[in-house]
Image (tube, rainbow, N blue to C red):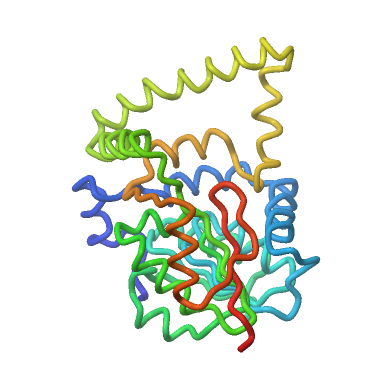
């Protein structure tokens, strides 16, 4: 899929309230990207996958977003294929590649959809398939997860993050995200309500614990190298939005020949047996 930034069909989805512009948020995030955030991204990959590096492996980044984890995988030695449905996210990933690995034949970046089985099949299979916080934003989560499982080669791993089903709480958040994406009025109403709430709640928690309130923002990059403010925006506006129980995710992937090797919170690592 070779569509450019500003694709009219994509913009129509945004205008109709069916999709959040994740890539616009990632463009803002990249302005604060530094070596510390990149190192933290590398660390999170190594920790969850249980490896010292990714030398000699192939890495598929489904929904590459800012491109940070594609960059981390490439720096760890993997041959990387990155794709995203959001044109701005594709532009972000391309910008990182050109900044850090210009004209690198070991890192491919293009536009594609996790819901396009023909496109995915054309890519082949990979040692690591990475889809962190992506497939529940496609509008067809189970189809997207199914497509991802088929990209894992024997002996390879699937690294997923899928929002957990918290019952009524999850359904309330679905309504909030729909409101955010409904237009300017809905977006500003959600921001005006929740951003001050998050800030004030954080200050109160820090004062009670005798912590410096600014420390939580400085230290947040230790969470996969991310930014608290941009994660807030991503969370409030992240639509489409689906969720599942741990048991549902594990059973679904195991039915497709994968074995769970690690599960922490909403993160999962599955492995396809060698035979």
Question: Residue 69 in the image: x percent, y percent?
Answer: 61, 59
Horizontal side, residue 269 vs residue 193: left or right: right
The residue at the point 33 percent across, 35 percent down is 168
Q: Which of 97/209 is in front?
A: 209
Residue found 74% across the figure and 63% down from its top: 50
**Which residue is situated farthest in the bottom direction here?**
275
Residue 271, position as x, y percentages in the image: 61, 73
* Image-based side of 97 in relation to 37, left or right: left
Location of residue 170 in the rendering, given as x and y in whole percent from the top left corner: 36, 39
Q: Nearer the viewer, residue 45 or 48?
A: 48
- Depicted 218 relative to depicted 47: above or below: above
Residue drawn where x is 22% and y is 38% of the image: 182
The answer to whether 89 is drawn above or below residue 188 in the figure is: below
**In the image shown, does 243 or 211 lie closer to the viewer?**
243
Q: Quadrant of the N terminus?
A: bottom left
For the C terminus, the image quarter is bottom right
């Amino acid at each position: 899929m070779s569509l450019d930034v500003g694709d009219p069909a994509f913009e129509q989805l945004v205008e109709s309230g069916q999709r959040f512009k994740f890539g616009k948020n990632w463009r803002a995030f990249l302005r604060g990207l530094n070596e510390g955030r990149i190192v933290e991204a590398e660390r999170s990959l190594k920790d969850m996958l249980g490896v010292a590096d990714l030398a000699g492996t192939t890495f598929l980044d489904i929904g590459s977003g800012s491109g940070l984890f594609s960059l981390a995988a490439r720096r760890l030695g993997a041959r990387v294929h990155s794709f995203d449905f959001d044109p701005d996210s594709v532009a972000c990933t391309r910008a990182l590649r050109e900044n850090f690995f210009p004209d690198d034949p070991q890192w491919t970046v293009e536009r594609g959809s996790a819901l396009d089985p023909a496109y995915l099949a054309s890519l082949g299979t990979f040692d690591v398939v990475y889809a962190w916080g992506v497939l529940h934003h496609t509008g067809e989560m189970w189809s997207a997860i199914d497509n991802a499982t088929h990209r894992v080669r024997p002996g390879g791993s699937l690294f997923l993050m899928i929002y957990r089903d918290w019952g009524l709480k999850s359904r309330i958040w679905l309504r909030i995200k729909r409101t955010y994406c409904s237009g300017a009025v809905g977006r500003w109403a959600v921001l005006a309500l929740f951003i001050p709430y998050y800030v004030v709640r954080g200050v109160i928690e820090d004062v009670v614990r005798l912590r410096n309130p600014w420390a939580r923002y400085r230290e947040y990059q230790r969470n996969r190298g991310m930014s608290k403010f941009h994660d807030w925006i991503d969370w409030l506006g992240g639509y489409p939005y689906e969720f599942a129980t741990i048991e549902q995710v594990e059973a679904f992937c195991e039915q497709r020949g994968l074995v769970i090797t690690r599960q922490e919170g909403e993160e999962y690592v599955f492995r396809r047996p060698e035979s």
